[in-house]
Image: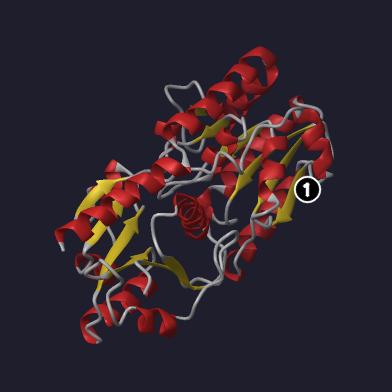
Amino acid sequence: MPELIVTNFNRNFTGVSATAAGVVRAQMQMGRYDMVLAGVALPGCPPPISRAKARALSRCPPPNRAFTIWHVRRNSEMRAALWARDVLRLPIRIVFTSAAQRRHSAFPRWLISRMDAVIATTETAASFVPHVRAVVPHGVDCARFTPADNRAAAWAATGYPGIRGIATIGRIRPEKGSDRFVAAMIALLPRCPGVTALLIGRAAKSDQGFLDALKQKIAAAGLSDRILFPGEIAPDDLPALMRGLSAVVQLPRYEGYGMAPLEGMASGVPFVATDAGYYQSFSCDGTTGVIVPEDAPRDTADAIARMLGDATAHAGMARAARAAAQARFSIDAEAEGIAAVYDMLWNAG
């Protein structure tokens, strides 16, 4: 019987999926638990079992444990775990990771109140949920995301035009600030020849009008060949693209945590961002990234231009970014923090 069941019920590969996959891979390397993944496959993780199989494997406690831990990250996963624990009366305990830095709506609040332990990813997120046993920031896999030996060659290998690249990564929608990025690029690119900007991600059907409006603005500025929409990038292809970038630019209106700047940092890529998610902490007092005002495309463009225009300063930020990712925001540190919560529950019996 497994000691740990990690759930992933979303068929789309989201930011939550990416962070879950990173933790599972790190937990596999730790080798401390007999663990399984339930639901939908995650890259680099064991083949998943079904929800029914997860329940069947939880009917009896694992050897030397009083219960199995289910680690959940979404509403649907909390519901399934509560059904297993409270209706089927299976010997399990439920751990929920919460990244939201705002008050949850009524039903998620109720679900979270029923968890045995909550892990918050930031101090702010911890202030909105009960039963917080630890604050454990998400970490990045510094063995998977690595700096390029030659950034120019790495960018050329991506096949995109120009001699340098910058990108924003995430769903194309207002909440993610895709329009802010486009406005900043329209202000920036005319004075930075050779730079190509990428909006990596897809728009939902409900945001198709928003995407069309962005493309119209880009066309009106004469920049359709320099501001590109590659769509989603497969998880296994993202590290190679990331190490070829010269800057990651994230300008969301809201972000629970935000992994893109951190993946860039591990790749030796500094960032420019609004004060959302955990970005202020990532910036390490401006040594690894720059925080810019909201809805200020000219200020954002100026910050990026300064970063790209000083090769010595850019190289220093790149080195500092990689060092900070390794020392403060590694996936190994996240896995250890989560393990401490598991042990706390098991030791309490």
Q: Which residue is drawn at 33% across and 78% down?
A: 58
Determine whether 103 is above or below 57 in the image: above
Determine whether 265 is above or below 68 in the image: above
Q: Quadrant of the C terminus?
A: bottom left
Residue located beneath label 1 in the image: 219
x, y percentage for residue 10? 50, 71
Q: Residue at x 62, y 21 (%)?
A: 307
x, y percentage for residue 141? 54, 43
Tell me the kind of residue under disc 1. Answer: Ala
Residue 292 in view (yes/no)? no
Q: Which is more toward the observer, 322 or 213?
A: 322
Element type at mark 1:
helix
Mark count: 1
x, y percentage for residue 102? 30, 52
Residue 327 in view (yes/no)? yes
Decide if residue 173 is on the left or right side of residue 31.
right
